[in-house]
Amino acid sequence: MRTLFPAMLSAALVAACAGSPPRAPDVPKPGSEPRLVVLVVIDQWPEWAFEAKRPALTGGFDRLLREGEWHIGEYPYASTITAVGHSLLGSGEPPSRSGILANDWWHRELDKRLHAIEAEDHTPTNKWLRVPGLGDAIAAAHTGGKAVSVSLKDRAAILPLGHAGTAIWYDAKRVGWTSLAPVPWLAAWNTANPISAHLHDIWTPLAETPGLAGIPDDAPGEIGEKGFGPTFPHALDATRNPADAVFATPLGNELVIETATEAIDREQLGADAVPDLLVMSLSAHDYVGHGWGQESWESWDTVLRLDRRLAKLFADLDAKVGAGRWSMVVTSDHGASPMPESLHGGRIGVDQIQDAANRAAVAELGPGDWIASAGYPTLYLSKAALAQKPKQLATALTKIVYALRSFPGLERVERSADFWGHCETRTGDAQVLCATLDPERSGEVLYVPAPGWILLDPDDPAATSHGSMQPYDRQVPVILLPPGRAPHAAPTAPDTTIPMTRIATILARWLGVSPPSSLPRADR
Ligand SMILES: [Zn+2]
């Protein structure tokens, strides 16, 4: 247990002081106002996995801890998924208010699934986000401050900013960078630094990686990702689609950081006294985690290389913006489960859940397709089911709930209507489930995996995943480099727990603008 759940042990250690407020000042002292505020999101970076790797990290992460504060961040909902986490990081709001339920969800009125940043015509959009993000907060302040985000993933670039600012992401089809609104320098950047030049790269591990990981390269459960096999070396051009395989390599981090650094120059970020925002969301570690697990050689190697790369980034920020003139939050959008093999858990296909639910509905309603979608975290009844008489429908719903409660690997199965609305009046798990649900957009049945169990898209198998109420999914590191900081001895364990809903407010205060949650809702 000690090696698997250091986060829970340290969480217990800090529980006594969990009520004390984080030390980071909300408002910078005069003279210490940052010119640039940076949010670094390491995608799928659980607190427990960081604690396991921390002693080996002597580069950028060590500097972060010697200058900053280390807290355990806790997400307030069960849908610990990329789009949801990035929405909350930028807005401070959970799905019950942001309307971003998952990476994609079923739209009843459209009779189809759409990605969180996908319009009906399949173009990228921020329209499903009901609340303002940090880009909106900066725009509303009318200070002339800029907001730029860079990520491999579209959803990770778009959602933290909200409805304003410059969102840039990697388009594997075009093998280059693209953006939501036109960015004047992006075409020249793509031409001058073609990603296609990297597509014959071969990823081999650093010399120290195998010893630090301490497990075989082909540990049980590892399956690889994006066409890579379970073991090193990983040659991009040995995959079906090398441009897509970039997502699952340390090269992916390198490209995001390079492009974000270019944005500092091109957009003149941090060049004057009005603070600007730069978001960097590093997607590669998420794909690495899904394919090989957090304990794998691949995960260790990705984090060791990131440790070195962050040290260079911080030196570049010192040179470009000025030492002490930039502030930073380093955190994650969600955690991940240890390998199910090590927790005596397992993997469940979402199609298995849909089939089991439909069989239960058939028992009441007769033959038919009664389930429109079962994508986590809620299951949607089909139009045909919703057209049934209310009494029959209620009975079918009860039968579905009871059938899924006997399904192996699910911790909670509930009628969504019992948990949505008035989240502030609920406590404990009921509040967490409530924060997960949007009464207008969520499906009729809510389900949550049990400890050690992960959900899979049948077309996309994985070593590990995220998306549950467990601490390994909800707890992530939060490292704050506040304005006016001074170097100190690096903490050996995290300090207090901090609700992830506070991050957007902390960033807004450092930026000198009102928190996004204080602005009018975007959907009214
Ligand atoms: Zn993610």
Image (tube, rainbow, N blue to C red):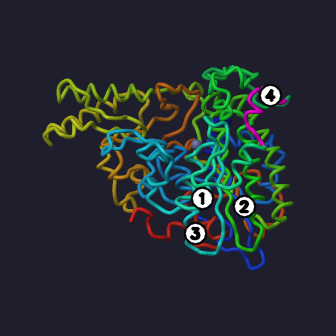
> Which kind of residue does numbered mark 4 sit on?
Pro
| Element type where label 3 sits in the image | helix
If you read the primary sequence from the N terminus, does the residue marked by circle 2 or circle 3 appear first?
3
If you read the primary sequence from the N terminus, does the residue marked by circle 4 or circle 1 appear first?
4
Judging by the rendered image, the residue that carries numbered circle 4 is 205
Judging by the rendered image, the residue that carries numbered circle 3 is 139
Identify the mark at residue 498; answer none if there is no mark: 1
Chain part drawn in magenta = 193-206
If you read the primary sequence from the N terminus, does the residue marked by circle 3 or circle 4 appear first?
3
Please determine whether, in this image, residue 520 is positioned above or below residue 177: below
Closer to us: mark 4 or mark 1?
4
Judging by the rendered image, the residue that carries numbered circle 2 is 267
> Which kind of residue does numbered mark 1 sit on?
Ile
If you read the primary sequence from the N terminus, does the residue marked by circle 2 or circle 1 appear first?
2
Q: Which residue is drawn at 83% across and 30% down?
A: 206
The image shows residue 2 at horizontal and vertical percentages of 67, 37
For mark 3, does the 10 Å Cα neighbourhood hold few (<14), some (14 to 19), or many (20 or more) residues?
Answer: some
**Label 3 beta carbon within 8 A of ligand 1:** no
| Element type where label 4 sits in the image | loop
The answer to whether mark 4 and mark 1 are in CB contact below 8 A is: no
The image shows residue 191 at horizontal and vertical percentages of 74, 43
For mark 1, does the 10 Å Cα neighbourhood hold few (<14), some (14 to 19), or many (20 or more) residues?
Answer: many
Q: How far apart are marks 3 and 1 (CA)?
A: 27 Å
